[in-house]
Amino acid sequence: MLSRVKRIFRHRWLDEATTRHAIAPDMLQRLQRRVAASEQRHTGEVRIYIEAGLPLNCLWTDAPTRQIARQRALDLFSQLRVWDTAANNGVLIYLLLADREIQIVADRGLNDRVEPAVWQALVARMSGAFRQAQFEDGLTNALAEVSALLVQHFPLAGNEINPNELPDAPILS
């Protein structure tokens, strides 16, 4: 019970201002340009979602933080319609600042082709950058790795153009 109360306070203490402090407007613009540039090399779609703390309805549980963050990322994957791409190759990069938790959710088209160990290693590298508050470096490197996987499995053919099915701008909450 006490750990649940502590978690609620930690997550409710942080807000969108915390997110905007960690991810400055110029960094947000750079990330958006990097997502757009990435999507010129493959047929996938990438979304980035950065959240200071979880909504209250996610916090009143005894589940481990990682499990709660995973469920939140899956919910956002659905809400943002990342699953709704033509080739089922959308990817959500989710960062929860309150717990420095990272989740990567890939649609079945890509996830079926990538071993779980690859995703785990990517998250581990991101975690190292985030522990040092190097959010831009961590997100940029994660985007580059996700893009490389998408290029490997869903490259653009010849003069093919990838229609932009989802917005490129990262979301701060």
Image (tube, helix red, strand yellow):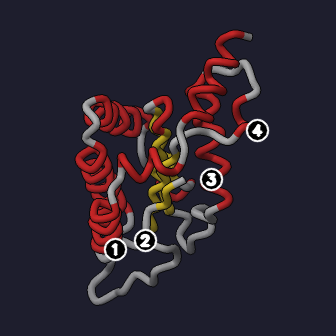
Tell me if label 4 and label 2 are in contact, CB under 8 Å: no
From where the camera sits, is residue 152 visible? no
Q: Could you tell whether 52 is left or right of 131 in the image?
A: right
The amino acid at mark 2 is Asp
**Residue holding disc 3:** 76
Q: Quadrant of residue 170?
A: bottom left
CA gap between label 4 and label 2 equals: 28 Å
Instruction: Determine the residue positioned at 67% across, 49% down.
Output: 75
Instruction: Determine the residue positioned at 66% across, 27% down.
Output: 8
Label 4 vs label 2, nearer the camera: 4
The amino acid at mark 4 is Asn
The amino acid at mark 1 is Ala
Tell me if label 3 and label 1 are in contact, CB under 8 Å: no
Mark number, residue 168: 2
Q: Secondary structure at mark 4?
A: helix
Instruction: Determine the residue positioned at 38% across, 66% down.
Output: 154
CA gap between label 3 and label 1 equals: 20 Å
Mark 1 or mark 3, which is nearer the start of the sequence? Answer: 1
Mark 3 or mark 2, which is nearer the start of the sequence? Answer: 3
Tell me if label 1 and label 2 are in contact, CB under 8 Å: yes
Mark number, residue 57: 4
**Residue holding disc 1:** 36
